[in-house]
Amino acid sequence: MPLPFPPGCPPDDADPKPGTYFRLAPKGMAVGDATSEACWRRPYETPKGRLEGQGDTPEAHGLSLFADIEDVRAATRFTPWFRGKSVAEITIGALDGSLRHSPTPQGESHHDWWTKPYDFLPQGVIVEVLEEVA
C-alpha cells in the first residue's frame, strides 16, 4: 500500500498533463490484460531499485511513464531489463495528479507522475509485450 506523500511532493515543477501514457509492466502479462496493483509499484517499493526503501524522498513516489511508446520500444536496444516486459497504456486526466517531464537515456518522452490522491490505483491495459531479443 502506498505511503502518504512526504513534504515537497509532488515537486513544484510538476503539473497536470492530461493525455495517454505508457508504463512498463511485469513480464508474463498478455495484450488486453488489465493492470494490477503490481504494475503500479512506487520506486520506494521496488526491490533492488535505486530508490528502494526511500519513502521520505519525493522522487521515490513518482511513477515512471513515457508519452511515446516508441521510446519504450527503442529502449530495449540498450536497456536489457526492458526486454520481455509488458507495456501498459493509461489515460491520465487533469485531476489525476501531477507530472514532470524528466527525459532519461531510456527516452526523451519520460515523465514522473505523482498520483492524486497518493494511493490512487490507476486503471490501464496491456497493449504490447516487448521482444525478448532486440
Image (cartoon, rainbow, N blue to C red):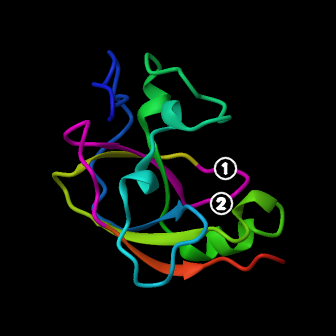
Q: Is residue 18 left or right of residue 88?
A: left
Q: Choose between 18 and 33: the one closer to the eye.
A: 33
Residue drawn 55% across the image and 62% down it: 24
- Quarter of the image that includes the C terminus: bottom right
| Magenta range | 103-123
Crowd tier of the residue under label 2, counting other residues whose Cα lies within 10 Å: few below 14, some 14–19, many 20 or above = many
In the rendered image of this protein, does residue 13 appear above or below residue 38? above
Q: Judge from the rendering whether residue 94 lies leftward or rightward of residue 77; answer left or right.
A: left
Q: Relative to 86, does residue 16 appear above or below in the rendering? A: above
Q: Position of residue 127 (x, y in %)?
A: 47, 81
Kind of residue indicated by mark 2 = Gly
Question: Circle 2 sits on which residue?
Answer: 107
**Residue 85 rendering spot, x and y as whole percentages:** 63, 68
- Picture residue at 28% right of the left edge, 64% below the top: 123
Q: Which mark is residue 76?
A: none
Residue under label 1, please give it.
104
Residue 69 makes an appearance in the image? yes
Residue at 25%, 36% in the rendered image = 118
Residue positioned 62% across, 59% down in the render: 108
Residue at disc 1, secondary structure: loop
Q: Position of residue 70 (x, y in %)?
A: 62, 76
Q: Is residue 26 above or below residue 48?
A: below
Q: Which of the 4 quarters of the picture holds residue 8?
A: top left
What amino acid is at disc 1?
A: Thr
User: Quick check: 103 left or right of 81?
Assistant: left
Queried whether the magenta region covers residue 19, the answer comes back as no
